Image (spheres, coloured by chain):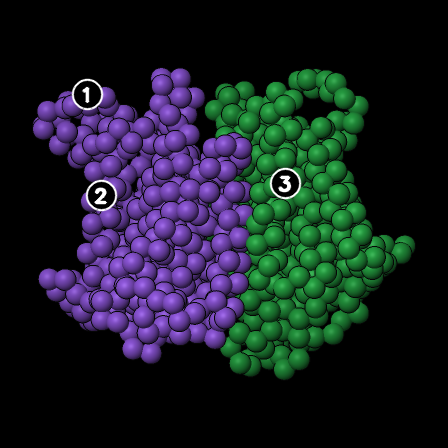
Amino acid sequence: MKQGVNVAVKPQKQKDSFLVGLGRYLGNFKEQLVILVALAGLCMVLSVLSPNFLTKSNFLDIARVVSINGIMAAGMTLVILTGGIDLSVGSIFALAGVIAAALIPGSYSESPFVTTFKLPVPAAILVGLLVGVLIGYINGLVITRFRIEPFVVTLGMMSFARGLTYLYSGGYPINFKPMPPGFQWVGQGYVFGLPTPTIIFVFVIALCWWILRYTAFGRTIYAIGGNEEAARLSGMNTRRIKRLTYLFLGALAAFSGIVMASRVAAGSPVAGIGYELDVIAGVVIGGTSLAGGRGSIFGTVLGVFMLGVIENGLNLLGVSTYYQYIIKGMILIMATGIDGYYRKKRCY
Amino acid sequence: MTKAKPPQNPLKKVGLGSQQLVILLSLVGLTALFSMLNPTFLSERSLDNIFRVSSIYGIAALGMTMVIITGGIDLSVSSLFALGGALGAGLLGIAYSAANPVKLPFFMAILIALGVTGFMGLINGLVITRLNLAPFVATLGMMTIARGITYVYTDFTVRGVPGSPITFMHPWFEWLGGGYIAGIPTQGVIFIVLAVLASLFLRYTAMGRNIYAVGGNIEIARLAGINTGLVIMLTYVISGILAGLSGIILTGRLLSASPLAANGYEMDVIAAVVIGGTSLSGGRGSIFGTVLGALIMSVLNNGLDMLNVPSFYQYLLKGIILVMAVISDQMYRQRTQQTSPV
């Protein structure tokens, strides 16, 4: 039993009994325990320092802010598990947000490309998502077809998609005269007392968890990250699986951008600049190895919450922006450093 | 210990393998294209500018090359750029509207600035090796910290509107950013000297060979008796110092040190290294390739600017050209039956 817990991340072909599955799940959980303790400690310190931290409205606020980063981080986890990386998420985020916003009734902009052609809200969101899917697919296609480092391909795509965003919007934000209530609900509404983005985030997390744990697609992702050559030789279509992860992340980044456009009631061409680092940081803090093959979606949730709580706490305490930079960096290093110090496996 | 494998190609000895040849050809091709479209591209002023800009990128890229060869990455270079520049300018104590009591001579100010950025690099290395942190996270943290320190320091020095730059006049700084040594731009000379030194260091010293060994397979390097932690730390210290030096030269060129300077430069520096054929998975790469990569980046920027390409289209073109450059390199390598990095 103990042995089974230790090899938790290895891909398994056959179905396990419920107890073995639970044990394996707790084994995964154990890896993230340090992060969980660090997060709890941080919350405790903040609740002592600021009476407003432990309020319902503040927690809903954290949940709402974290969700936007978290939706992307969930998809990024899949990409990083294959040993890849995607730097273009921030640009996909902006492009999809701008395109969806431009197609929604009531939007206007100075840009010549933003015409009077409008679509119903769900159709406009779908078009935005398709843009993300297309860009993610191109990323995956170039990476697998030409076998280039994902870092370079997605760095190029980051520049390319940002350029498309600027061209389409002319550099002007897309605003709404009356914002359709349907679209407003996506970023600002509530479901059962929880912010809509949070519900979407929970749904995305559940989906990714299910994919990684119970589908052949998910198990293959771990296999590719562990040893791509071995995975290929045992008959897995590694290229197709890798393409799918980039495509999936593209869709999630687009969706996240659309939620953001709704939340701030504008499609901004400068949205999401530098987000790729925040998203990747969330994934890596959660214990997912950048070398691939090791990590979990649960860790990613903890990672993005860690970043969100740090940001929120520093704002509540009224720390000046400049010192926020310094403190944020130090907490980032310390929180993950504690974990690394006790971990045997080296990651440099 | 003798060299592991004697190079078959004499050109390889100067780092000009077949892979670098492809990059060199694309550099020549780009230059020919731009000079055909705009004859002033090859004018003295234009070349001077290309040389100066590529040196500023390139000096930081030299350190980054060593870090990437060990299999690491340094995202903090952009902030160390800004920090080095701000410290170098601020410590002189001659900034306009300065409230800073410290007044140091030029060389002291620069030495201290480089010392501080080198120290930041050392912290990067310590966190990565001792706390066992992924370089991506450690240097991402340092990127935020150093940027914060730069903001605090410039505000302390200028005491004006928050975020305003340190502006000043200084003959030595002007020489560093806009002067000449024997008719060649100063920073170009510094870049060439440093590139030659780095190349010799990587090729002919035990420590330099160890950098490749660590990147190739860290476990084997450790078992072979190499102090892997020390090697890794050294690369981050070098990267920090060189990033600081780039920042000081940039400050000399602008005669102004902004706390916002070089935001996002880490991607450009990494792109220069990767275009130069250094593998992000470590163990493979050369200084000569990085020099070519830095030249390609600035030829591209300068050429597109001189052709009056709107900045929106420049984003598109730069993305496409970056990927095309690496695709052509990869296809060439596949044809010559070398292993691919992915």
Question: Circle 1 sits in a helix, a strand or a loop, which is it?
Answer: loop
Q: How many marks?
A: 3
**What shade does chain B have?**
green
Residue A292, quarter of picture:
top left
Q: Position of residue A110 (x, y in %)?
A: 47, 75
Q: Viewed as shown, does residue A26 lie left or right of A89?
A: left
Query: Where does label 3 land, which residue?
Result: B325
Q: Pick the residue in front: B6 or A211.
A: A211
Residue A60 visible within the image: no
Q: Is residue A100 above or below residue B76?
A: below
For disc 1, the chain is: A
For disc 3, the chain is: B
For disc 2, the chain is: A
Q: Viewed as shown, does residue A275 lie left or right of B95?
A: left
Amino acid type, label 1: Gln
Question: Circle 2 sits in a helix, a strand or a loop, which is it?
Answer: helix
